[in-house]
Amino acid sequence: MPEPRHFITFMDLNLTEHRRLLERAIELKARRAHGCYRTDHLGGRPVIMMFSKNSTRTRVSFESAITELGGHAIVINMGDSQWTRGEPLSHTARVLSRYVSGIVIRHTKEEELVELARWSSVPVINALTDESHPCQVLGDLMTVAERLGGVGALDNMSVCWIGDGGNMLNTWLQAAHLYGFHLAFACPEGYFPDSGILSRASANNPRVRACKTVEEAARGADVVTTDVFASMGFESEREKRLRDFQGYQVNAELMKLAKPGAVFLHCLPAHPGEEVTDEVIESPASVVWDEAENRLHVQKALLEHLIPAL
Ligand code: CP
Ligand code: NVA
């Protein structure tokens, strides 16, 4: 059996594959808009989705994607599985591989996904870890491509990131590393992205820039994006983070510094009034609902790519 392809970090696909995947997602979206929802790519094969953290979009968009590709989604809360009672990952991976054609997993530690993948004979897909959220950035790039005039426009766009250097910024850095676009980010002291991901992205792409102020990061941007101050698993730091992130809000004043026609992205869920104002979320610049929808289309394209047709 050929080695499975995994999608644990954004870098697990090369740039050609990323571009093709976005083109395919755009095509699948257009077909669906004409009533063509269903293909039989998965041919009834099951895919398991395992969660050790909450989810709305990822859970529902993946389950819909699997259904629309003619497969069957099995969803389990990891707390109900033997994993959390200490069954070795090497055992779990080999057992699941005998039942399903893919493993979609949301979990804290990315290294455990890597270990799972080492033993799995079916593709493992990262549905968010503390380190990265590659499926989200696929959806984000598709949304920007729709607005900026196609996938080719991504190479030279300017992205502004404001706020926490967590899983979302780490993944934007990996995307900038691969695509070569401008990425200016402003994070409070002590909330910088992963140093390894940042240094590799900066070494490969001189357009990656850490900014001292949010204004500097936003000036001339095509895309302005942010995330909650306290991600899942960091709730106990919420009060401290609310203090440390003062001034790191995307509001109408900040959006004025971006290019005319710039778009606002947020992976959601948002905390309106904290990292972004309600006014910006509800403004014409905001594409957050398309961004959420596009998770479905990019994940269909991803599943097609990683799980070959029968
Ligand atoms: N954006 C995102 O992954 O949302 P959920 O946490 O609802 O899945
Ligand atoms: N950074 C957020 C993203 C949620 C989709 C979190 O990890 O909670």
Image (cartoon, rainbow, N blue to C red):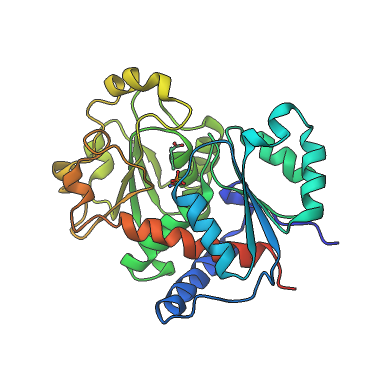
Left or right for 156, reference 75: left
Residue farthest toward the front in the current orientation of the protein: 80
The image shows residue 248 at horizontal and vertical percentages of: 26, 32
Q: Quadrant of the N terminus?
A: bottom right
Instruction: Specify the quadrant of the image occupied by residue 131.
Output: top right
Q: Is residue 80 above or below residue 73?
A: above
Q: Is residue 291 above or below residue 244?
A: below
Left or right for 39, reference 221: right
Q: Quadrant of the C terminus?
A: bottom right
Instruction: Specify the quadrant of the image occupied by residue 18.
Output: bottom right
Q: Is residue 79 visible?
A: yes
The image shows residue 213 at horizontal and vertical percentages of: 25, 32
The image shows residue 172 at horizontal and vertical percentages of: 45, 46
User: For the point 59% across and 76% down, which residue is it?
Assistant: 39
Q: How many marks?
A: 0
User: For the point 64% across and 66% down, which residue is it?
Assistant: 71
Of residue 56 and residue 282, the one placed in the foreground of this image is 56
User: For the point 73% across and 34% down, which residue is it?
Assistant: 82
Of residue 161 and residue 270, the one placed in the foreground of this image is 270
User: For the point 20% across and 52% down, which residue is it?
Assistant: 282
The image shows residue 84 at horizontal and vertical percentages of: 68, 30
